[in-house]
Amino acid sequence: MSLSDDSARMTFWDHLDALRTVLVKVVAVVVAFGIVAFLFKEELFSIVLAPKDAGFITYRWLGFLDGIFSSAESDHGFSVQLINTGLAQQFLIHMKTAMCAGVFCASPYILYQLFRFVSPALYADERRYAVTVVGSGYVMFMVGVLISYFLIFPLTFRFLGTYQVAEDVDNLISLESYMSTLIVMSLSMGLVFEMPVLSWLFGKLGFLNASFMRRYRRHAIVIILIVAAVITPTSDIFTLLVVSLPMWLLYEVSILLVKSTARNSKSVDVSIDLY
């Protein structure tokens, strides 16, 4: 197997020009999606602000489950008012949210363009592994973002948004605080969900094994708690536990993936020896 002949003949300046073309295309697509998201303000913020309402699907499902397992009637409604504290804050948040939506919608195209730029320099087997890692990493990142949006952020927002030290102290959450918490938690959980993919890759490369991960499980739990405390924008124990639990589950899944990788490697070695 050999590298692409066209890639081998390209000079440094040719590669730089190709990279510039890729970046221009990516920026143009992101800006286009961002403009569309900016124009559809009502639809955009109906999605972004949905977790603050008691009718959000997560709260309705929790109420449904609570009604099944509990005979006592309880009031699941809550109300949290968002306020704006800056003259131009709402317009700036509108722009930032639209650009974030643009990057989110254009992310498949971004990965496609970056892969097209890098793939000529890869061998065929390296290209196959790159497709697996990048594709799996993208899917896991999106799963982490969705879990943050539908589960972790709503539970955190409902708990902190309705928590009161006294009845005469009302909660007035700023729009900036709401958006920053949502974005930080979504990005953080997206990155955290890359753990199984990276573990599989390191196991495939021989840098990691399941016995090592099991031996240092307690140390990993401590590290998980520290990382959860760092990436969570709030400092309460509830949010810490809500974020730490998925990370611990991902660590256990990573152990299984690394173990299966080692088993497959042994099978391949036995087949080669028999041959």
Image: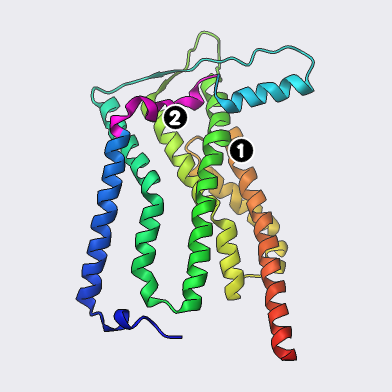
Horizontal side of residue 248 vs 36, given as left or right: right
Q: Which residues are magenta?
A: 38-54
Position of 165 relative to 149 (above/below): above
Q: Earlier in the sequence, mark 1 or mark 2?
A: 2
Give x and y (percent) for residue 241.
Answer: 62, 39
Q: Nearer the viewer, residue 131 or 218?
A: 131
The residue that disc 2 covers is 47
Q: Is residue 40 magenta?
A: yes
Label 2, residues with CA under 10 Å away: few <14, some 14-19, many ≥20: few
Position of 132 relative to 265 (above/below): above
Label 1, residues with CA under 10 Å away: few <14, some 14-19, many ≥20: some
Looking at the rendered image, the disc whose residue lies closer to the viewer, 1 or 2, is 2
Residue 117 in which image quadrant: bottom left
Q: In what element is the residue under mark 2?
A: helix
Residue 198 in which image quadrant: bottom right
Q: Nearer the viewer, residue 243 or 269?
A: 269
Q: Amino acid at mark 2?
A: Ile
The residue that disc 1 covers is 242
Give x and y (percent) for residue 57.
Answer: 58, 26
Is residue 63 at all visible to an observer of this figure? Answer: yes
Give x and y (percent) for residue 234.
Answer: 50, 35
Give x and y (percent) for residue 125.
Answer: 51, 77
The kind of secondary structure the magenta stretch mainly shows is helix
Q: Amino acid at mark 1?
A: Val
Position of 195 relative to 13 (above/below): above
Q: How is the rendered protein coloured? A: rainbow
What residue is rendered at 45% in x and 35% in y?
182
Is residue 207 at all visible to an observer of this figure? Answer: no
Horizontal side of residue 159 vs 70, given as left or right: left
